[in-house]
Image (cartoon, helix red, strand yellow):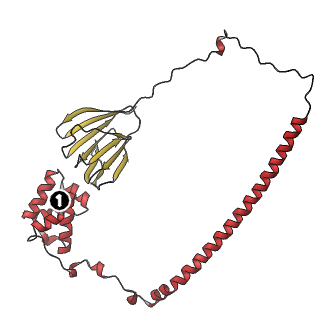
Amino acid sequence: MSELGNRLKQAREEKNISLDDLQNMTKIQKRYLLALEEGNYSIIPGKFYVRAFIKQYAEAVDINPDSIFEDFKNEVPSTSNDEIPEQLSRVKTHRELPKSASKFLDLFPKILTVVVIIAIAVGLWVWRQNAAENNTDAKQESITDQSETEYTNNVENTPANDNQAAEEEPAVDENDSTNAEEVTPEEETPKQAITVKESSGSSTVYELTGTDKFELEVIAKSKSWVSIKNDKGKTFIGKVISEGESEVGDYTAESEITVRVGNIPGTDLKVNGELIKYEDAKSSPQNITIVFKKE
């Protein structure tokens, strides 16, 4: 094992990240990751990829890639421009394009101009149609208002019947118990509660009660590796979340999940919008288990 490989492996093991986890985080095949740790660069296709894989590995375990390249410059293979992946050098210039493509590029400004003119014409036509409809609606509203005014004036000018008796409101018996409003006490809505049930070393168990919803939001205040699994071993997330980003998941169907956080001080966990208070807000990594007691 090379000194560079030993440095990378040591950093990975300190963060308790397996090669499988690292493969999910970097999207680099496990055999190439193992080759970096063993210093066996011969199985990696080209020096360019060796440097690229070392850079991704270092970032995933929170090591500055520049310091790696500087400290182990005798081990890291140097690259040259001719080793850039072949597909990057296959970009054709305008002069190398087929004649048909060149003609299309020449006609493109004219085609674009025609399309813009048509779009403007259609927009004007739609605007005129809408304006005509609005004028029609305004006239109809004016006619309706005039009719209502005439009807009101006719009603107000009609003489009242002298023999019409004034209607009296029925008296209310204060002793009539049927008029009393019955006050029914409102049932108290259960409030969500997140309580610590067990804490041991780098593991803490919380219990979520008083709700029928379980939504978890992971907020990265600084770059952090996070994985989320249920009690059956199913993995929902296993990756690095960049600073300022967040991941939201609905785990209402689960009875228990475990969140492994690689950077506790730089990561917030919110359950249904409520911030979880860590028992140990400094140690990393930690396993945060949340048991969901459904209502």
89 versus 73 height, above or below: below
268, above or below 181, in the image: below
Number of numbered labels in the structure image:
1
Residue type highlighted by circle 1: Ile
* Residue bearing the label numbered 1: 63
User: In the rendered image, which quarter contains the N terminus?
Assistant: bottom left
Left or right, 119 with respect to 55, comes to: right
**Residue at image coords 58%, 76%:** 116
Q: What element carries label 1?
A: loop
Q: Nearer the viewer, residue 228 or 160?
A: 160
Q: In this view, does 106 lie to the left or right of 269?
A: right
Seen as rendered, the residue at the extreme top is 175
Q: Taking the image as drawn, is residue 35 in sight?
A: no
Q: Quadrant of residue 154?
A: top right
- What residue do we see at 90% from left, 36% from top? 157
Q: Can residue 181 be seen in this view?
A: yes
Within the image, what quadrant is residue 259 found in? top left
Using the rendered view, name the quadrant where residue 71 is placed.
bottom left
Instruction: Please name the residue shown 55% across and 84% down the image.
Output: 110
Residue 206 location (% of width, % of height): 28, 35
Q: Residue at x 18, y 41 (%)?
A: 202
Dot 1: within a 10 Å radius of its alpha carbon, few (fewer than 14), some, or many (20 or more) residues?
Answer: some
Q: Position of residue 147 (x, y in %)?
A: 84, 46
Residue 134 position within the rendered picture, expressed as x and y whole percent measured from the top left: 72, 58
Q: In which quarter of the image is the C terminus?
A: top left
* Relative depth, front residue between 171 and 292: 171
Which of these two is toward me, 146 or 7? 146
Relative height, residue 14 to residue 132 (above, below)? above
